[in-house]
Amino acid sequence: MAETLRCPECGADLAADAPEGLCPECLLRQGLCRGTGGPLTTGPAAAETGSGTPGGAGPTAHFTASSRFVPPEPRELARHFPQLEILELLGSGGMGAVYQARQPALDRLVALKILPPGVAHDPSFAERFTREARVLARLSHQHIVNVHDFGWAGDLYYFIMEFVDGMNLRQLIAAGRLEPSAALAIVPQICEALQYAHDEGIMHRDIKPENILIDKKGRVKIVDFGLAKLLRRAALAGE
């Protein structure tokens, strides 16, 4: 009689061909971080925002191309964002951290993205950030995550963005929930969004499954346009 395979993380029964030797739930928890340099905190619309080795935490952490900050707890952010209710951390990586938040004044959920605190060490970053953020805020397309607001609070540069209730493409693939017909439907939406951005003179520069969000109705939303270029310059300035 063949031995029953079990997930080493939770003990659940496994199929013989289970990827990474883990059940789908544990795969999601780990974020299937092949090629991303570290684990991903999963959740609705959680986008892995980069890679790197663990680095300093807190608002004075120095940011370099290889650093990775520890994202603040939601309660730590509350004093910086009195206009928001910070609900939970959705995901983090080398390009920042994303939180689910609520705007009480508008009674809507939003995504709050904070950039690595060390970018503030680059004296020219504020000007570049404002210029790039204004360009991104003008992007208006059904398959691109909308930027509602941006700015800085203390040492934290941030974007307040459309909240996408769903999963990123990496998570869908890991969970085995992406049917061929669904995959074929995703591709034209990605191409349409990228073409629109290119027509507006904007390149993404970091297209990968983690930056492609799929909502519960199967609609694509691309996130993090322009951030790779912006943060790469900040990293080079801080070296």
Image (cartoon, helix red, strand yellow):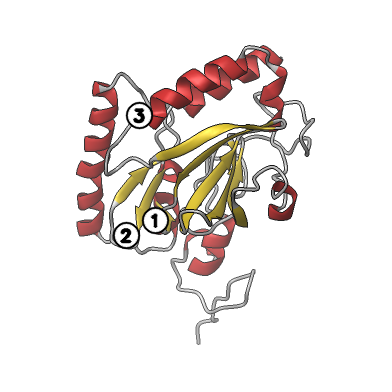
Disc 3 or disc 2, which is closer to the eye? Answer: 3
Q: Name the residue under label 1.
A: 173
Q: Is residue 146 rendered to the left or right of residue 93? A: left
Q: Is mark 3 on a helix, strand or loop?
A: loop
The x, y position of residue 229, in whole percent, is 49, 21
Can you identify the residue that label 3 sits on?
A: 138
Q: Nearer the viewer, residue 37 or 138?
A: 138
Residue at point 71% right, 30% down?
155
Q: Residues within 10 Å of mark 2 (few under 14, many from 20)?
A: some
**Farthest residue in the front direction?**
105
Task: Report the Cα–Cα distance between label 3 and label 2.
Answer: 32 Å
The answer to whether residue 64 shows anywhere in this view is no
**Which residue is nearer to you in this view: 158 or 82?**
82
| Amino acid identity at mark 3 | Arg
Label 1 – label 2 distance at C-alpha: 6 Å
Give the residue pinned by disc 2.
Answer: 178
Contact? badges 1 and 2 (CB < 8 Å): yes
Residue 161 placed where, x, y %? 46, 43
Asked if disc 3 and disc 2 are in contact, CB closer than 8 Å, the reply is: no
User: Disc 1 marks which amino acid?
Assistant: Ile
Which residue is depicted at the point 67% across and 28% down?
66
Specify the quadrant that holds the C terminus.
Answer: top right
